[in-house]
């Protein structure tokens, strides 16, 4: 995954220097922690997350578990690995299905974050698992959004509920509600509701998303975030958490070559798990997110 290439290289370099040492002095530990801190900040990881992370690593690296270890340097790498897994959310969290179908999944995020593409990817993945998803086009803000979801649904071979063209702008909350009703009638066991996104966080958009949430009572509200948006990730995530209280995060464009570290901050700052990683424009480019595998990739 290119996104973490630079961060990964920097950490590897830091640990290479450490490996030449036998016992670690407090100065060695401090030097290492300082380098980790710089690498994370340069990768756009949010400052509070970096601070907490490095404080934990330092405390543990100066503690007994390292002093008594046969190979102290390796022990430090192990600690960094464990703490990375922790900021990425710890355990893998799977998509949660309703006890009584349909499972309702609402998507939220900025325009261009990859929401519509993700809707198609998720529909395709769920179909492969034997589900019968219905996509619902409740993004009526952008003229082309409904059409775009229709194209994606076609590619994914998934059913779609969309407002009829020519009926005016329409009410996205009603469309979402109707979509859930259609799913019930036609026995779709999952409903994926695409909602409008704007270029920046905006009060009207957030109210609309909150109204759709209230009207459909989703089992999951997934916040889709472009892994390449840098430091803005944290503020955007906080605004969406306040606005729609999302239940999980989808990191998109993890295949990009930007610094990507901001993505590392989102789970930690919001306390919401990352459930999927989106890794390309193709509909098959979607993976369930595993904090431990991601940490290994970063430290590889
Ligand atoms: P939306 O406005 O949030 O619905 O975003 P879209 O789904 O339309 O995606 C915006 C652009 O990002 C499109 O050109 C997509 O092809 C592209 N895109 C979406 N997901 C990914 C991804 O995981 N990787 C890459 N490289 N591009 C993506």
Image (cartoon, rainbow, N blue to C red):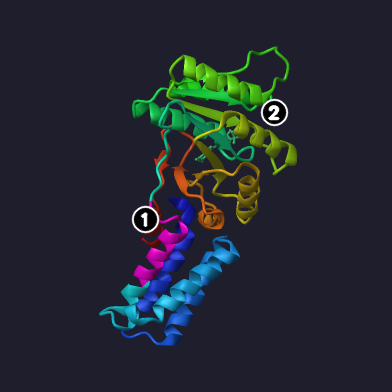
Q: Is residue 36 visible?
A: no
Q: Position of residue 197 (x, y in %)?
A: 65, 36
In the displayed structure, would residue 108 be above or below residue 239?
above
Residue 173 lies in quadrant: top right
User: Helix, strand or loop at disc 2?
Assistant: loop
Magenta stretch: dominant SS? helix
Reading the image, the residue beneath label 1 is 292
Is 185 magenta? The answer is: no
- Looking at the picture, how far across and down is residue 269, in whole percent? 56, 57
Q: Residues within 10 Å of mark 1 (few under 14, many from 20)?
A: some
Residue occupying image coordinates x 34% and y 25%: 130
Which of 23/184 is in front?
A: 184
- Mark 2 or mark 1: whose residue is earlier in sequence: 2
Q: Is residue 242 left or right of residue 276?
A: right
Picture quarter with ligand 1? top right
Left of 226 or right of it: where is 71? Answer: left
Q: Quadrant of the C terminus?
A: bottom left
Within the magenta stretch, is there residue 84?
yes
Residues under numbered marks 2 and 1 in contact, where contact means CB atoms less than 8 Å apart: no
| Distance of label 2 from label 1 (alpha carbons) | 38 Å
Q: Residue 101 location, x and y as percent?
A: 43, 26
Q: In percent of the image, x 47 and y 81: which residue is there? A: 30
Residue pushed farthest front?
100
Toward which corner of the image does residue 59 lie, by quadrant? Answer: bottom left
Residue 122 versus residue 177 in the image, above or below: below
Q: Nearer the viewer, residue 150 or 126?
A: 126
**Which residue is at 60% across, 52% downward?**
233
Tell me if the residue at label 1 has its CB under 8 Å from ligand 1: no
Q: Which residues are magenta?
A: 77-91
The residue labelled by disc 2 is: 141
Q: Where in the figure is residue 43, as x and y percent of width and height? A: 54, 61
Q: Residue at x 49, y 19 (%)?
A: 183
């Amino acid at each position: 995954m290119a996104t973490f290439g630079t961060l990964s290289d920097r950490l590897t370099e830091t640990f290479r220097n450490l490996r030449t040492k036998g016992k670690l002095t407090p100065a060695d530990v401090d030097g290492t922690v300082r380098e980790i801190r710089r690498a994370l900040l340069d990768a756009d990881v949010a400052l509070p997350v970096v601070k907490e992370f490095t404080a934990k690593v330092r405390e543990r690296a100066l503690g007994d578990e390292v002093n008594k270890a046969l190979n102290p340097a390796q022990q430090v790498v192990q600690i960094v690995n464990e703490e990375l897994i922790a900021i990425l959310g710890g355990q893998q969290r799977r998509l949660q299905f309703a006890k009584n179908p349909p499972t309702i999944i609402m998507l939220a995020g900025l325009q261009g974050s990859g929401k519509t593409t993700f809707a198609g990817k998720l529909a395709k993945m769920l179909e492969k698992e034997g589900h019968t998803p219905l996509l619902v086009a409740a993004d009526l803000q952008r003229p082309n959004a409904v059409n775009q979801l229709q194209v994606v649904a076609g590619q994914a071979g998934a059913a779609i509920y969309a407002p009829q063209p020519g009926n005016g702008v329409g009410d996205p909350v009603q469309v979402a509600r109707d979509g859930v009703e259609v799913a019930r009638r036609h026995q779709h066991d999952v409903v994926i509701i695409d909602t409008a996104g704007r270029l920046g966080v905006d009060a009207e958009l957030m109210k609309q998303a909150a109204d759709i949430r209230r009207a459909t009572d989703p089992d999951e509200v997934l916040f889709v975030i472009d892994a390449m948006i840098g430091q803005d990730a944290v503020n955007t995530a906080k605004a969406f958490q306040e606005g729609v209280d999302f239940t999980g995060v989808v990191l998109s464009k993890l295949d990009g070559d930007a610094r990507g570290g901001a993505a590392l901050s989102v789970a930690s700052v919001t306390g919401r798990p990352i459930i999927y990683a989106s890794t390309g424009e193709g509909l098959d480019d979607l993976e369930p997110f595993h904090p431990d595998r991601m940490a290994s990739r970063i430290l590889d």
